[in-house]
Image: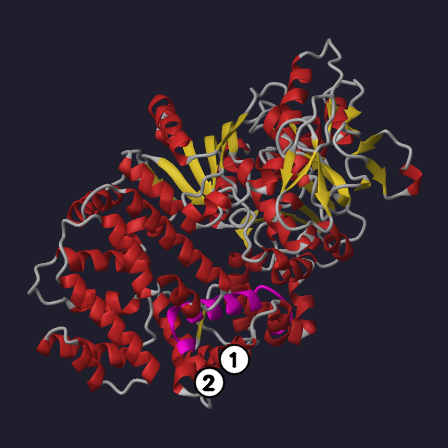
Amino acid sequence: MQPPVLTNQQQQVVEHGKGHARVMAVAGSGKTTTLVHRVLFLLQQGFQPKRIMVLMYNRAAKEDFTHKIQRLAPYGQPLPDIRTFHSVGHRLCDTLSNWGVIQRRKLIQEGWSYERLMRQAITQALADCDEQSRRTALDLDHLEAFSQFVERVKADLDPAATQFKQLALPDDQLYFVSAFEQLEQLMADQGVMTFSDLLYRPVMALLSQPELKARISNHLDQVIVDEYQDINGIQHYLLSVLAGARAQVMVVGDVDQCIYEWRGARPEFMLSEFAEQFPNPESYALSYSFRYGHTLALAANHLINENREREAQLCLATAQHSDTDIVQLDQLVELLPLIKQTGLEQGFHQCAVLVRSWALSVPIQLAFLQQQIPFKLLQQGHFVFNQPLITQFLAYLDLVVAPVQAPIQPETLTALLSFPPLFLSQQEQQRIQQLVAVNGLDPKAICKSLSLKPYSGKRLLKRLTLLQKLQKESAEQAVGPLTTRLLQETEAFELIEKAAATRDQAEERKRMLQGLVNYLRQQRMSVQALLEQVRWQREAGASLESDQGIIISTVHGAKGLEWPYVVLAGLTEGQFPCYQNLSDFNKHNEESERRLFYVAMTRAQKMLWLLTDTGLIEDKRKKVSRFIGEMSLTDCLNTVTQLKQPEKDLGLVVQKAPLVQQYLQLNALNFRVGSQTVSIASYGTLSSVDTSLENKLTYKIGDQIKHKLFGRGVTAPRPFGRGFQLLRQQPARGRIYASLHWQEPTVLRPLV
């Protein structure tokens, strides 16, 4: 829903006068429309189009902006340069090459050629290491980790060694630093570069030869930058060079939507470093969202208010927008009929399912396939049956249904030896294939013919013996028990963890496999029937047309998009927020995850479903995501009731009274909002740790107290419903019950 006319806030941005400006724009605030009108306003004021530059985050945003300004501009009006940072970098590379400052290079177009260069660089960096170390470093997982490190280095100004320390990477990846230098030399020798080099190379040249800046700076009068919260160190520096001392710079973004830190983005760029580079900027706010209603706006405010690294700004729903409903679902089976009915009535393309990681989409994809609910993925390569890990696991089932005497095909044998990984070299795998092709599957003979270390030989013998046994088993056996046995006998989870280059890689693969395994265990059918069903499902997924189906995407991939009906799935602790060990999950990580959750929930226009079921059996025991409790849904609903009855004071009492009070005031309601307090319950006795509170009969959220039975703790809101709980500072073992309440009968609540 776009505003028919500009709001007062938007008009202020459009008519900004002299000096730099920083615009904090909430999700769905119509910032693109505002910036289009800003450019047209500058042209009306007499600024030359060639001295105005608009920088968009990516090509899609650039094309959208170009289309809108062409539609609104007077006929024949010359328009300014609308670019992405990388297109500016491309032009700078050409300019600096013409000046003889940097070498002219070709952009690498094929992924395989860049992979070959990375392998060569790693091999050179590990020239003095043993063969096993080089083999591990060259496997796909470690190669991917190195590639991510290279991209991260080229997103910032610090050298590779410094960034390695900042990223706190493990010591066994220290070779990344020297491999990076080797890779840079190899690309220079061959005259090639990557997409990241379009910015990295000219910026490094400018840093090494500062006198060049005078030839590049001060050619512009106005620079406008969109999505500034996603800028990285390289882009921030390049902007300062382009602007020089002449240009007025206006940046637009939302710190609460800074979710690309792994690309080098940091909230500090918008919060403080912009003002340091471009002094005394005027600050503006685009607070009204035209995307969602009051309930979602209030829930989003409650959630993101928990972050400290942000501006104190509320997002507001417009009075014209219908409310956005928020519903929590505890089981995937509850979602299926709801979203199917919605799709049939409103169109499946009006719905989206968002997940923290692609692995969490596996149970949802499988459930949709089984229920014949059409869907498509924003990145089709993540279709469940396109995943190598999935196809490799299913190869074990294919072996069961194959004729007993049928030879194992080379590609099938490669899959069975690769998953779970046995850490065999390519030459060793080829030798095994040759022996199987000539003599059949003879585990002992194959192992004797290879010069493997004892442990590796024992592991290979176990795998080949399993394959030999599977060839003789019945295709009519139940698939569930066989799946469980395969997990145990292949030691799948243990070997996945051992092979992964990072803990994140390991967890992603384990989640993906667990999602498939849970699905297979639920199927009451034979191996033969299951594989026939899988073949049909694979074809159904592959044939889905681009304009059909529910969208499935990660939250990162959904940035900038919106749908009427959104499912936010996998909402348990450890999954979203994502962490492996709670002890390693610090405040910075928590705020980053909360921003990601904020982006996810603000994609919805009419309905937001919060699905706490991940589809993983072991997650049934996990707690619901803390972010659901932080949304304070009960208070949001009560506040919306007050907004719908402006003539009557309902006597609101909520957990975050200042926030709700401010929201009401910004909607022209001046009712007093009370804070929830804790009264002493009949169960046990409360006394304050702070002597100044000893005689209080009521307590507020956050008060430190001492319970004679439960010990020291702090009062906190219950995640659901009305009431309070005592959070122990040093919890004892076992399950503890605390009885704290407010305006309701005594409630016993378990504290784990």
* Residue farthest to the bottom, as pictured: 128
Q: CA distance from mark 2 to mark 1?
A: 7 Å
Nearest the viewer among 541 and 577 is: 577
Q: Quadrant of the C terminus?
A: top right
Numbered mark located on residue 678 in the image? none
Magenta stretch secondary structure, dominant: helix
> Residue 157: within the magenta?
yes
Nearest the viewer among 334 and 648 is: 334
User: How far from the left and from the top, in percent, is residue 683?
Assistant: 74, 31
Q: Which residue is mark 1?
A: 175
* Residue farthest to the right, as pictured: 692
User: How far from the left and from the top, in percent, is residue 743?
Assistant: 74, 21
Residue at image x 34%, y 47%?
518
Q: Is residue 635 left or right of residue 341?
A: right
Does label 2 or label 1 sit earlier along the sequence? 2
> Residue 31: within the magenta?
no
User: Is the Cβ of the residue at disc 2 closer than 8 Å to that at disc 1?
Assistant: yes
| CA neighbours of label 2 inside 10 A, class few (<14), some (14 to 19), many (20+) | some
Dividing the picture into quadrants, the one containing residue 549 is top left
Q: Is residue 166 left or right of residue 506?
A: right
Render colour scheme? secondary structure
Q: Is residue 641 left or right of residue 96?
A: right
Which type of secondary structure does the marked residue at label 2 adopt?
loop
Which type of secondary structure does the marked residue at label 1 adopt?
helix
Q: Which residue is mark 2?
A: 126
Nearest the viewer among 736 and 317 is: 736
User: How far from the left and from the top, in percent, is residue 522?
Assistant: 30, 42
The stretch of residues the image draws in magenta is 136-159
